[in-house]
Image (cartoon, rainbow, N blue to C red):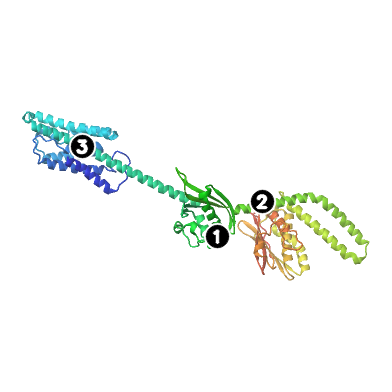
Amino acid sequence: MLAVGSAVFLFSNIVERSGDDSLHSVRLTWRGYSPILVLSSAFSIVICWILSIYSAITLEIQMSLVAMVIGVLYIGAGRGFLLLVLETLMYLMFGSGSGAIDFLVHSGVLLYPAAALCSPLFLRSSIRQKRFITALLILLSAALTMLAAGLRMRLHNLDTMTWWVILFIVGAAIVAGSYSIQAIERIMERKQLNQQMLNLSNRVITEAEKLRQIMNVAPMMITSIDADGQITAINENALQILRRSVPDITRETALGINLLQLDVKTITSGLQQTIDIIRRLPEEQHVHNELMRLEYGTFYISIAPIHQLPDHSLTGTVIIAQDITEVERLRNELSHVEQLSLVGKMAASITHEIRNPMAVVRGFLQLMREKSPSSLDHYYLIVMDELDRANSIINDFLSLAQNRIVEKQLYSLHSIIEELLPLLWADANLRGQSITFIPGQNVPRLDLNSKEIKQLILNLARNGMEAMEDKGELVIETEATASEVIMRIRDTGPGIPQEKLDKLFEPFYTTKSKGTGLGLSLCLSIVERHQGRIVVDSVEGEGTTFSVIFSHAFGSKETEPEEPS
């Protein structure tokens, strides 16, 4: 019995020490545990035959057949044939029987086919059924042994004591087989449980890693803390915000920080507000949604408690913040659009109501000037200049409000600029300034509305001339790249302070004492109708450059090389 059990002992030790948890099914496979079971069954067969040499019983019931039967049942006919070969060799070496009958019975040749046929059914059965099948095969082996002894006429020579010993050996073989089956199944169940635990652990690790990656790519700041305030998880966006209070923090060191114990003097106002809400959560027990406008952006923050089932006790807090600075900027731009809409409504309502009376007033002023003394001419000129200025403001209102689809044609940008140069030179001469036009090479024709582009150039050029002192220089320059045409209007004025650059194109914003704040808004509207953009570069004390950038992806490839003027 111990010799039969040695197979289980060896099998268990090899399996446990191998650390191989790749069991895919209840059936042992050659790539899985079959080699181990072949080895352990072979070891048991050899031990049983060695012990049989010292047996005092004349009619041997070979226990080695139990080990062979169990091995064949588990590993099938093909691989179990190795055990049959080993059993046969052991019989030839140590067997005491003689003749063909003893060879067939004690070498397992007759028992092997029965075990091989039972193997598929055995592997699909429950533990109890497996033990029953094994017991039947052991009884079959005993029956074959008795049959062989009967054929040799040896049974009548056995006394009662020997019969009891034989029955005891058969029972012991059944018990040993049952124990071996029970032990192997327990080992396999344990290995399966270990494999399931390993798979579950791997799934947990995989899901945790997946969750970490999702947190990192999410366009939000996500942080979770436990009930004591210590950070348990944090994504990269939240880490960037936390670095404003703790500059040298890393993901590893962040997991050891207790938010509730941070020094009040070192944290930002936004983090302080968040900590105050977290401290109130145990009493309030509801989700807090806050809009925080901080010096580095605007954030929508949700702070929610984490409860543990089934008692719903508070185990932590999750903080989710979304940067809505860009949304706020778009909201401000929408406000500007609404202002432009208001300008359009105002322009539509005042066009006919004001321009016609103003034309009548100006006509009568000219008539009164002709009949008045010359000493009053400068008063009339002042009044008419102011009327002209009011009319110009109305024109700007109308131009800005008419956000319509303009008719475009293929024009040379250089031709438009050259048409305006005499007018610009005249304005510059009156101011004691100079204008330089530097046309670029290979500038293609563009889809333009010449009237609007002239208005754009006049507005930007006159703004530059008004910004410069006497003897200033205004440079108009063009350049063609692979996909764009750039027109730069550069002055040598005092420049624009950085804090004013962001507001230049807002309606009604102006730095001039008599400006309306509509000139640059009108320029931006014209450029946008031409699918372009304006970039402003300014250095205080050196000057300002307005770069108007047009795309010529859909324009003409025809170019007109021109000489610098």
Spot occupied by residue 521 in the image (x, y as percentages of width and height): 71, 56
Crowding near the residue tagged with mark 2, few <14, some 14–19, many ≥20 C-alpha atoms within 10 Å: few
Q: Which mark is residue 177?
A: 3
Q: Which residue is label 2 attached to? A: 334
In the picture as drawn, the residue positioned furthest to the left comes out as 157
In the figure, 435 relative to 94: above or below? below
Q: Residue 143 is drawn in which quadrant?
A: top left
> Secondary structure beneath disc 1?
loop
**x 49%, y 55%: residue:** 236
Determine whether the residue tagged by mark 2 lies in a helix, strand or loop.
Answer: helix
Residue type of the residue flagged with mark 1:
Thr
493 or 410, nearer to the observer: 493
Q: Say if 9 sits above or below 377 in the image.
A: above
Which one is earlier in the sequence, the residue at label 2 or at label 3?
3
Residue 104, visible in the rendered structure: no
Residue displayed at 75% across by 49% down: 345
Say which mark, if any, is on residue 268: 1
Q: CA distance from mark 1 to mark 2?
A: 30 Å
| Residue 141 on image: x %, y % | 17, 32
Give how far across and how far down residue 145 sits, in percent: 13, 32
The alpha-carbon separation of the residues under discs 2 and 3 comes to: 86 Å
Q: Earlier in the sequence, mark 1 or mark 3?
A: 3
Check contact, mark 1 vs mark 3: CB within 8 A: no
First along the sequence among labels 1 and 2: 1
Three-letter code for the amino acid on which mark 2 is drawn = Leu
Task: Kindly indicate whether the residue at mark 2 contacts the one at mark 1 (C-beta within 8 angstroms).
Answer: no
Report the front residue among 560 and 240. 240
